Image (tube, rainbow, N blue to C red):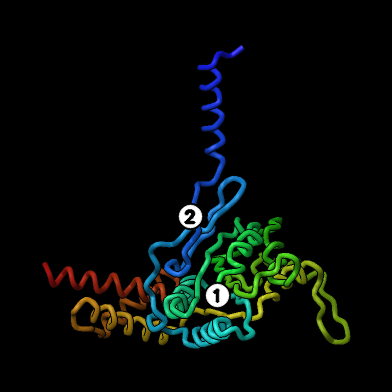
Amino acid sequence: MLNDDELKAQLKRVLTAVEQLLPQAVAPLDWQTCHAASWRCHSFSGFLHPVDVLDPVLLEDLLGIDRQKLILEENTRQFLDGFPSNNVLLWGTRGTGKSTLVRALLNRYAADGLRVIQVDKDDLVCLPDIFTAIREKPYRFILLCDDLSFETGESSYKMLKSALDGSVYAAPENLRIYVTSNRRHLLPEYETDNLGAKMVKNEIHHGEGVEEKISLSDRFGLWVAFNSFSQDQYLEVVEKIIARICIQQGISPFWDDEVKLSAIEWSREKSKRCGRTALQFAQQTIGRKMREEKG
């Protein structure tokens, strides 16, 4: 039989082990001052963790995607005004500004009550808990799932599908779901998927495999496509970014044939003409020029 000291020591070990499984105690978020949060899972539960440092990007900073900005801003303003609005799938090639556009919208409309909650793919099973946490809040929430795609055999997409479909796990009225992805249908597509397709009255009817994949993305009311720039678009964006950064740094903007050729070569090495590539080239070029002038 254990004596008192041994019993206390054993209980202490048990409590220490249990504490490691439990989530940390967190105070309720003050959404008045907290404009963005991320969902953190811990063992058996999860909690909303405030994002202290926000990306300062503005809508005006995003170049070459005017059509996409117009569509998404219009939908977001409808949502903020309490008018009918849609969940959104932003899809396209990497580096084209999909998630950055959502962050820019937050900076523009946070004063109007817009808030953002970012959720990782693996935490989509916690959507009902997130909905409960914000359902009664007097704010308008965008639930952002960034760079989302599912692989063959994964079933976590079914929770997202249910949330979009208005079932038992439907999102509350004060929340819209914005998803970014490189895949239009979020799921991998194979040539064999089309083997089950058939022609009925001159219309193609997809097989079950394709229908299942389309059914998820089809639940988003808006599809906003982001494509790579043409070379002329890319060079125009590079020139504007260089001018903007130069003004911020207090130096004279510069643009000539040598810089233009360097920008083209940079995009070829990156194998991508997009806003991210343009920004990276501008930062490298301006930084090198400032260092040379200083030295």
Give percent across and percent down for residue 224: 58, 80
Q: In this view, does 115 lie to the left or right of 172?
A: left
Mark 1 crowd level (few <14, some 14–19, many ≥20, 10 Å Cα): many
Residue placed furthest toward the left: 295
- Residue type for callout 1: Arg
Residue reaching furthest to the top: 1
Residue depicted at x 85% and y 80%: 199
Q: Name the residue under label 2.
A: 27
Q: Nearer the viewer, residue 202 or 57?
A: 57
Residue 31 visible? The answer is yes
Q: What residue type is labelled 2?
A: Ala
Q: Is residue 237 left or right of residue 191?
A: left
Q: Which of marks 1 and 2 is in front?
A: 2
Name the quarter where the N terminus is drawn. top right
Instruction: Return the x and y of residue 126 as percentages of the image width and height.
Output: 63, 57
Provide residue 50's location: percent of width, then percent of height.
46, 60
Secondary structure of residue under mark 2:
loop
Quadrant (top left/top right/bottom left/bottom right) for the C terminus: bottom left
Q: Which residue is drawn at 69% across and 62% down?
A: 159
Label of residue 140 in the image: 1
Q: Which residue is drawn at 36% across and 78% down?
A: 264
Name the image quarter holding residue 278: bottom left
Q: Is mark 1 on a helix, strand or loop?
A: strand
> Does residue 133 lie above or below 87 as drawn?
above
**Towards the viewer: 14 or 196:** 14
Do residues under tags 1 and 2 come within 8 Å of each other at their CB atoms? no
Seen in the picture, residue 281 relative to 73 is either above or below; the reply is above
Is residue 181 among what the camera can see? no
Disc ID at residue 123? none
Image position, residue 150 (x, y; %): 64, 61
Give the CA separation, mark 1 to mark 2. 21 Å
Residue count near mark 2 (Cα–Cα under 10 Å), binned few <14, some 14–19, many ≥20: few
